[in-house]
Amino acid sequence: MDKKELLKIICDAEKEAAKLILHADKIIADCKTDARNVVTEYDVKVQNLLVNIFSEKISGAKFFCEEKDNNDSLMADHLFIIDPIDGTMNFVKGFSHSCISVAYAEKGKVCIGVVYNPFLDEMFYAIKGEGAFLNGKQIHIDDCGLSNGIACVGTAPYRMDLADKTFTLIKKLFEKTLDIRREGAAALDLCSVAAGRANIYFELMLSYWDYAAGVIIAEEAGAVSCTINGNALPNDESKPSIVCGGPKAVKEFLDFELF
Ligand code: LIP
């Protein structure tokens, strides 16, 4: 299937699924591993709707999803990597800052990313090699280096053992940048980098479904991404650290060498 046709299917599906988020009421959080790691009926409803649409429209569609136990092979020919609601805690607490994140990969290589923020009606998307877009307008990073930009940070709240390292890095970024933002949805942090709103984003632990779509969008907008040790980001469920931003900013970050 033509990638542009596939992109439209994903965008349309995310817009349809977003209605469940916008019309949600009585949002009840169920704990997955602990009080910080929660899921709602809307995460599951959004994911099921997306899986049904993609299964119907794409023959052989396979899935790797946040709220699914028996995930398919990451090397599938037509794999959809889905975070149905990225920023679930924001959604539960009424912060209107969450998104639907879908990446499409072939044999382990992500070639399409789509991140939709229904609260702002902002559709970020990219096809490998064809640039990054926000609501039809091409977007680019702001490769201004740390001192002239805002840093988005993730606190890896499921990993309190990483807190000291996380806040050491946050303090360093606070000293080196104009300011920091902890907005609570990694996919949207990555899209903020792509749109030139933030010039760097890091988090010490992130799942594949959180970053698969946002990373291709940021990279198609000119960003670079890697682990905080400078290694390539894995296309798997190993939950690596991540840093993504303009080349200048990422080099400055990697040169911190704090650990
Ligand atoms: C969240 C990320 C966030 C991270 C949280 C969680 P979820 O995704 O977007 O940046 O700090 O630990 O992973 O769980 O809301 O889909």
Image (cartoon, helix red, strand yellow):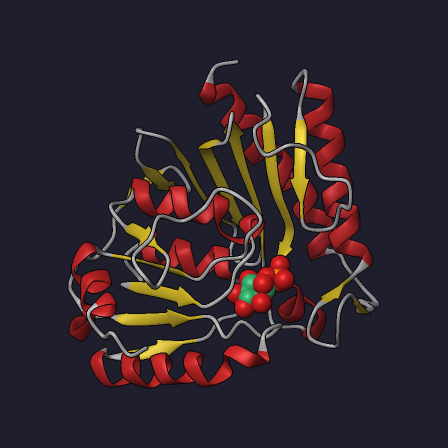
Q: Residue at x 30, y 64 (%)?
A: 200
**Quarter holding residue 256:** bottom left
**Where's residue 241, x and y in %?**
44, 62
Name the image quarter holding the C terminus. bottom left
**Where's residue 20, x and y in %?**
74, 50
- Does residue 17 appear to the left or right of 184 in the view shown? right
Q: Residue at x 51, y 25 (%)?
A: 106
- In the image, ligand 1 is in what quadrant? bottom right
Q: Residue at x 74, y 77 (%)?
A: 35
**Where's residue 83, x and y in %?**
62, 49
- Does residue 190 appear to the left or right of 259 in the view shown? right
Seen in the picture, residue 30 relative to 194 is either above or below; the reply is below
The answer to whether residue 87 shows anywhere in this view is no
Q: Residue at x 66, y 24 (%)?
A: 61
- Does residue 10 appear to the left or right of 242 in the view shown? right
Seen in the picture, residue 12 relative to 226 is either above or below; the reply is above
The answer to whether residue 234 shows anywhere in this view is yes
**Quarter holding residue 41:** bottom right
Give whichever of 128, 121 is nearer the camera.
128
**Where's residue 150, x and y in %?**
29, 72
Seen in the picture, residue 253 relative to 220 is either above or below; the reply is below
Seen in the picture, residue 232 relative to 157 is either above or below; the reply is above
Counting the numbered discs, the total is: 0
